[in-house]
Image (cartoon, rainbow, N blue to C red):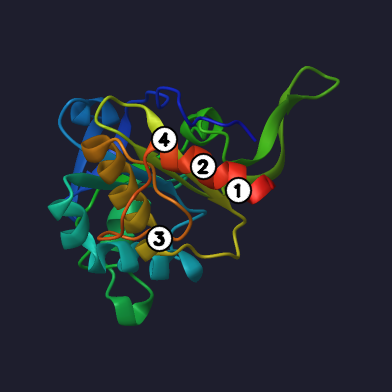
Amino acid sequence: MAVLVGKKAPKFAAPAVIKGGEVVQNFSLSQFVGKKYVVFFFYPADFTFVCPTEIIAFQDKIKAFEERNVEVVGCSVDSEFSHWKWLQTPKKEGGIEGVKFPLVADQSMTISENYDVLAGEFDINDDGSSAFTGVPQSYRGLFLIDKEGVVRHQLVNDMPLGRSVDEVIRMVDALQFFEKNGEVCPADWHKGDAGLTATQAGIASFLAKH
């Protein structure tokens, strides 16, 4: 698994559904560089069981992200047409109607590959033909990208394991607190808690070892 923290987020341009029903081509995270933070997350597939609980949970907390100047963007290997249909399907029928943040279509699986969350890999058979081994879907990867386009936090869950949206918000708060105050955030830090200066952190580390 590649560690992208501290590196520029891989670029892409792909179809996406925005605003709950508008299909656009060449959607890119580059449009947010210098303007917004981005929470970019992958999920295995449309019309499944755990995925809608996560996507709806992000939508339920979307105001909290907007207040923090964060753009939430989802991505799976499904087509933009599958995304669109799922977005038009009522929740009681297994859909995600009401979700407004962008959903990127990664049918080629290259975005998932570049973020190293693809649950399988391409290979070449003995006859020279291309083959795919594993599951042609994405793990539940999540990347917090700062306004300079640099990945500052990443998390990858196996497919059966849903994520905590509240934890994502906590990580956004921690990053923004550090950027504003220059203080680091200790374990279980939450917005409103005190941070640590470099000197305090060094003392704490020394005391923990002695």
| Place of residue 77 in the rendered image (x, y in percent of width and height, measured from the top left) | 47, 44
| Place of residue 117 in the rendered image (x, y in percent of width and height, measured from the top left) | 57, 40
Tag 2 residue = 203
Tell me whether the residue at label 4 lies in contact with that at label 3, contact meaning CB atoms closer than 8 angstroms.
no
Which of the 4 image quadrants contains residue 56? bottom left
Task: Determine crowd level at label 3: few under 14, some 14-19, many 20+ residues with C-alpha closer than 10 A.
Answer: few
For the residue marked with disc 3, what is the amino acid? Glu
Tag 3 residue = 167
Separation of marks 4 and 3 at Cα, in angstroms: 24 Å
Separation of marks 3 and 1 at Cα, in angstroms: 28 Å
Separation of marks 1 and 4 at Cα, in angstroms: 14 Å
| Place of residue 17 in the rendered image (x, y in percent of width and height, measured from the top left) | 25, 46
Which of the 4 image quadrants contains residue 106? top left
Separation of marks 2 and 3 at Cα, in angstroms: 27 Å
Q: Residue furthest top?
A: 128
What residue sits 33% from the left and 40% below the top? Answer: 183
Of 177 and 72, which appears nearest the observer? 177
Of 124 and 31, which appears nearest the observer? 31
Tell me whether the residue at label 3 lies in contact with that at label 1, contact meaning CB atoms closer than 8 angstroms.
no
For the residue marked with disc 2, what is the amino acid? Ile
